[in-house]
Image (tube, rainbow, N blue to C red):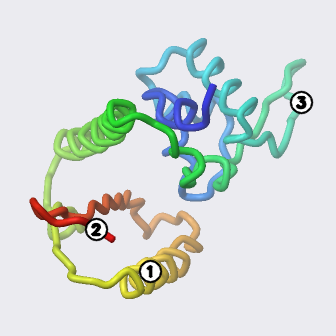
Amino acid sequence: MIKIETVLHPVRFRIIQKFIDGQSKTAKMLGKELKDIPQATLYRQLDTLVKADVLVVTEENQIRGTVEKVYTLNISAASMSNKDIKGLSKEEHLQYFLVFTAQLMQNFEAYLQSGEVDFQRDGVGYRQTALHLTDEEFMGFIKDMAKVYEKYAKNSPSPDRNKRMISNIIIPERERGTEHE
């Protein structure tokens, strides 16, 4: 199984999302957060993620004659590199992008159904911005964004902090009749 299929499988993608804030979790903890996933399916998908090295077992605790595993995300194994996606067909790219955007839609729908919706209070929004950048300026922009993410990704969960999912999609616009060199 290629890496992108492992990560962008709808159920496994949802499991991975529960770890992207750096927390470690047990299957029992995940089951409480992903109530709509049957327990057998959850364990099967956790096993697939461990075999692919996307999740790592960081602890094993003896509990009443059984072993409870504690999982942690292997960020480098969960991230897609150019090597991982090189060679995919246009149709495969569209399929994987659809899985990704469908998950975003599910997250947004869950937010809308969660009760009182207040975009300003919750920091919710969806927007598109056009930036005119040289390749060098774009790489600087990406490095600056990475620094901002790194600064705030170190925050531990606490009662006064809300988990906010931030998703970026960067697509270069190609004008008709022009070639990118």
Element at badge 1? helix
Whether residues under marks 1 and 2 lie with C-beta atoms below 8 angstroms apart, the answer is: no
Residue at numbered disc 1: 139
The amino acid at mark 1 is: Met
> Of label 1 and label 2, which has the lower sequence position?
1
Residue at numbered disc 2: 180
| Left or right position of 55 against 153 | right
Could you tell me which residue is drawn at 55 percent across and 73 percent down? 155
**Horizontal and vertical percent position of residue 94:** 31, 36
**Horizontal and vertical percent position of residue 15:** 53, 36
The dot on residue 109 is none
Q: CA distance from mark 2 to mark 3?
A: 58 Å
Question: Would you call the spot at circle 3 few (<14 residues within 10 Å), some (14-19), or many (20 or more)?
Answer: few
Splitting the image into 4 quarters, where does residue 174 fall?
bottom left
| Left or right position of 172 against 44 | left
The dot on residue 62 is 3
Of 28 and 95, which appears nearest the observer?
Answer: 95
Of 106 and 101, which appears nearest the observer?
Answer: 101
Element at badge 2? loop
